[in-house]
Image: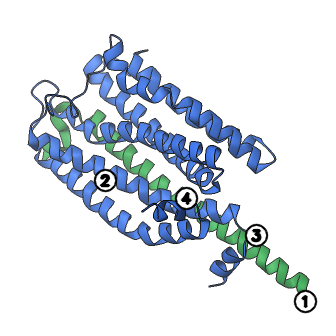
Chain colours: A blue, B green
Amino acid sequence: MWTWFYKLASPPYVFGVAASFRPWLFGAAALAIGYGLIAGLGFAPPDYQQGDAFRIIYVHVPAAIMSVTVYTVMAAASAVALIWRIKVGHAVAAASAPIGASLTLLALVTGSLWGKPMWGTYWAWDPRLTSELILLFLYVGVMSLRSAFEDPAQGDRAAALLAVVGVVNVPIVHFSVVWWNSLHQGATIVTLEGPKMPGSMLWPLLSMWLGFMLFYGAVLCIRVQGEVLNRERQSAWVREAIKS
Amino acid sequence: MSSFWSMGGYARYVWPCFGITGVVLLWNLWAARRSLNAARLKVARALAMAASEAQ
């Protein structure tokens, strides 16, 4: 049953799987994002309070959710690499960091563009915004630390340690709107009472969320291939793969 | 159609958000492909050097 899990520790296996999954993930991401954009921009009704400005959620919410999801993936891969000394873990963590950083920046910028008409300001030192900014700094820290060492293995270990320690910020980002007084609205999609949005607004949002996840998977596949090639360039299988 | 583009008066906030999102997604794609191509090139160069040294 666990054979597939053990196989994920093998660089050539991961390289091959990433190559074969990539086009399917891109195709599915294009379909989900395409549907989300058309339905969200063209068919979802305006919000009774926020008007058409609410449509910003179709890019802001998926980016914000993915910013913490990618960090969690990066921290889990780092933990696997540190505990079981599986090199592919470092490759996945290194590949995830720039994607997560760009999505966190996107969440901050789109949130700020939504904040101006709704709150009257582009930025407030609100718990949700501040913890999201700390998340961006963590991503930048992990990437900088990895490249700060001459010995790549040392850089990998230091970056992995920071990624694992920094995962404490993930629940802070999520629960900041519950634990502290916040300008930011609370949970809308995942609540005990069910989503607080009508289906015509919710389905495009879920589709965009799925599209962003699939897109992350597709880009991760490309980056992991590059990381594996870099780390395994002395191996015979890499030379064979490049020759063919 | 003009009401679609004006976004109920919020066009200057809504459209830049979608534009920036497009830029970020395309950048991710471009940067990932560039890093994979660079890794491929590095291995190919190492192979070529090893072959020329062997001759």
Query: Residue B31 falls in which quadrant of the image?
Result: bottom right
User: Mark number for residue B55?
Assistant: 1
> Horizontally, is A29 left or right of A96 in the view?
left
Which chain is disc 3 placed on? A
Mark 2 vs mark 3, CA separation in Å: 36 Å
Mark 2 vs mark 1, CA separation in Å: 51 Å
Amino acid under disc 1: Gln
Amino acid under disc 3: Gln
Q: Secondary structure at mark 4?
A: helix
Residue A29 placement (x, y as % from top left): 32, 59
Q: Residue under circle 2? A: A211
Task: Give the camera-side residue of B49 and A119.
Answer: B49
Q: Secondary structure at mark 2?
A: helix
x 59%, y 52%: residue:
A89
Q: Residue under circle 3? A: A234
Earlier sequence position, callout 4 versus callout 2: 2
